[in-house]
Image (tube, grey):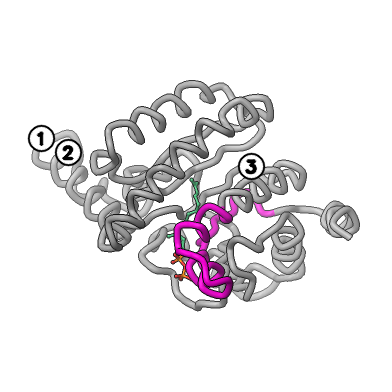
């Protein structure tokens, strides 16, 4: 069944170059099983592997995952600490495989708020995977899109004040170039799991013309087949970027 979906993707042609995912529903998955929430997050780790491997097999170039928002710092300390531990565990467990598969990992967000050991793990995975050319994997951690846009505005203001940039030099490209996602461009497809129709302060600027796909699947139940269904749905759409069909 999964292979069949992959074959259909290849027959359809162009795959989305950049896919972003809001991984949601770990808490509900745990609640349905009367388990503590952190066990839902732990179950979600294997779905991250499914998404990465599925993206590679489908020929996606960039995968941007929303793992932890700035707002998530308001969760109970025990859940935050479980998530930080999981991040370290994910990196320790996957680093060799990611390197072997040619995945280059970057972490986007305010890493200053991470624990020292989580920050060290993040720096290690970035350093050790830098040559990967099969897939760029961006993990958004302690990330907020409004904070990212505010930072870009400050950078531009500083450059204008320093005389390095004129006011006319501030255009859409100048803003995009100062966002954390600048090297990878805008997503073609955004997937959100668990049925919520929200963007939750994720890639607000970058999603201007992104196709949205919402699945009821809770993140721990997400497999590469779920990813392939989303890609097939995307391939059936006509993207117009605000223009009329030709
Ligand atoms: C949203 O579910 C999920 C998160 C806040 C954490 C995402 C973390 C993982 C998938 C595991 C670790 C991943 C990496 C990359 C280390 P929720 O808790 O908001 O679910 P709910 O809406 O059902 O309560």
Rendered residue at 68%/46% (across/down): 60
Q: Which of marks 3 and 1 is nearer the N terminus?
A: 3
Q: Looking at this view, is 101 or 47 the one in front?
A: 47
Q: Are marks 1 and 2 in contact (CB under 8 Å)?
A: yes
Q: In this view, does 236 lie above or below 223?
A: below
Between disc 3 and disc 1, the foreground one is 3
Q: Do the residues labelled 3 and 1 touch (CB within 8 Å)?
A: no
In the picture of the structure, the residue carrying the numbered disc 2 is 159
In the picture of the structure, the residue carrying the numbered disc 1 is 162
Count the numbered circles shown.
3
Mark 2 element type:
helix
Q: Position of residue 196 (x, y in %)?
A: 51, 77
- Residue 147's mark? none
Q: Looking at this view, is 196 or 78 the one in front?
A: 78
For the N terminus, which image quadrant? bottom right
Rendered residue at 66%/61% (across/down): 222
Give the image quarter of residue 237: bottom right
Rendered residue at 12%/35% (across/down): 163
Q: Where is residue 99 in the image (x, y as percent from the top left)?
A: 61, 25
Q: Earlier in the sequence, mark 2 or mark 3?
A: 3
Q: Looking at this view, is 112 or 87 the one in front?
A: 87
Which region is colored magenta?
16-44
Give the image quarter of residue 97: top right
Residues at marks 2 and 3, CA–CA distance in whole angstroms: 32 Å
In the picture of the structure, the residue carrying the numbered disc 3 is 61
Dot 2, how many residues are within 10 Å of its Cα: few (below 14), some (14-19), or many (20+)?
some
């Amino acid at each position: 069944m999964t292979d069949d979906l992959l074959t259909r993707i290849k027959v359809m042609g162009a795959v989305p170059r950049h896919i972003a995912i809001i991984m949601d529903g770990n808490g509900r998955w745990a609640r349905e099983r009367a388990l503590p929430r952190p066990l839902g997050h732990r179950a979600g780790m294997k779905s991250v592997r499914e998404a990465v491997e599925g993206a590679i097999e489908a020929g996606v170039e960039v995968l941007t995952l929303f793992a932890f928002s700035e707002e998530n710092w308001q969760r109970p300390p025990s859940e935050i600490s479980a998530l930080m531990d999981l991040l370290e565990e994910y990196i320790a467990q996957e680093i060799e495989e990611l390197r072997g598969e040619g995945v280059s990992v970057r972490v986007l967000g305010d890493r200053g708020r991470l624990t020292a050991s989580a920050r060290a793990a993040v720096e290690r995975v970035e350093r050790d995977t830098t040559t990967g050319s099969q897939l760029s994997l961006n993990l958004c951690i302690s990330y907020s899109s409004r904070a990212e846009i505010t930072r870009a505005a400050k950078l531009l203001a500083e450059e204008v004040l320093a005389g390095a940039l004129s006011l006319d030099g501030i255009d859409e490209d100048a803003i995009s170039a100062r966002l954390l996602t600048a090297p990878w461009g805008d997503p073609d497809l955004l997937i959100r799991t668990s049925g919520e129709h929200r963007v939750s302060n994720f890639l607000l600027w970058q999603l201007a013309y992104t196709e949205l796909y919402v699945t009821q699947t809770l993140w721990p139940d997400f497999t590469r087949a779920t990813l392939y269904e989303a890609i097939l749905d995307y391939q059936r759409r006509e993207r117009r970027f605000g223009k009329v069909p030709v």
